[in-house]
Amino acid sequence: MMVQDLQEARRTWTSGWGWFLAAGIAWMIVSVIVFRLDVDSITAVGGVLGVVFLVSGVDEFTLASMRSSWAWAHVILGILFASGALWSFVNPADAFWSLAAAFGLLLIFGGAL
């Protein structure tokens, strides 16, 4: 009975992994087609980062206007996100390399744990 339970648990955990593999391969193909490592793709990633920062800044200012507690923290985060968006739009290549460096640092921390 114990072996059957373990086999059932293994089937439950491993079923459907092919979909994740196929999705990962599809995203890799899309990234190779859309973002080829040239100057235009670096600029595009920096611009996308600027849009993400801008939307996050607007969200933080909206939260600050809707909540009375911690509103000052939301305003500070909104200012930081808005300045990050401005920096990303002015220097998209620098924003890309900063994002890559921060992601690399996260990978180092993740690998060290």
Image (tube, rainbow, N blue to C red):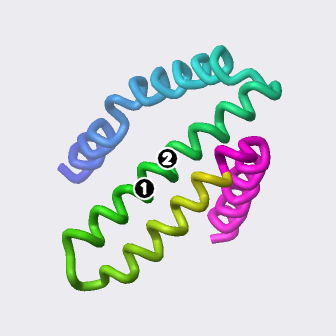
Q: Label 2, on which residue?
A: 52
* Residue 17, x across and y down, in percent: 40, 31
Find residue 56 and name its label: 1
* Residue 3, x across and y down, in percent: 27, 47
Q: Marks 2/1: CA distance?
A: 6 Å
Crowdedness near tag 1: few (<14), some (14–19) or many (≥20) residues, C-alpha within 10 Å: some
Residue type at numbered disc 2: Val
| Magenta segment boundaries in residue numbering | 88-113
Question: Is disc 1 placed on a helix, strand or loop?
Answer: helix
Q: Residue at x 67, y 41 (%)?
A: 46
Q: Is residue 61 above or below residue 4?
A: below
* Residue 62, x across and y down, in percent: 29, 62
CB atoms at circles 2 and 1 under 8 Å apart?
A: yes
Q: Residue at x 65, y 62 (%)?
A: 106
Residue type at numbered disc 1: Ser
Q: Classify residue 70 by image quadrant.
A: bottom left
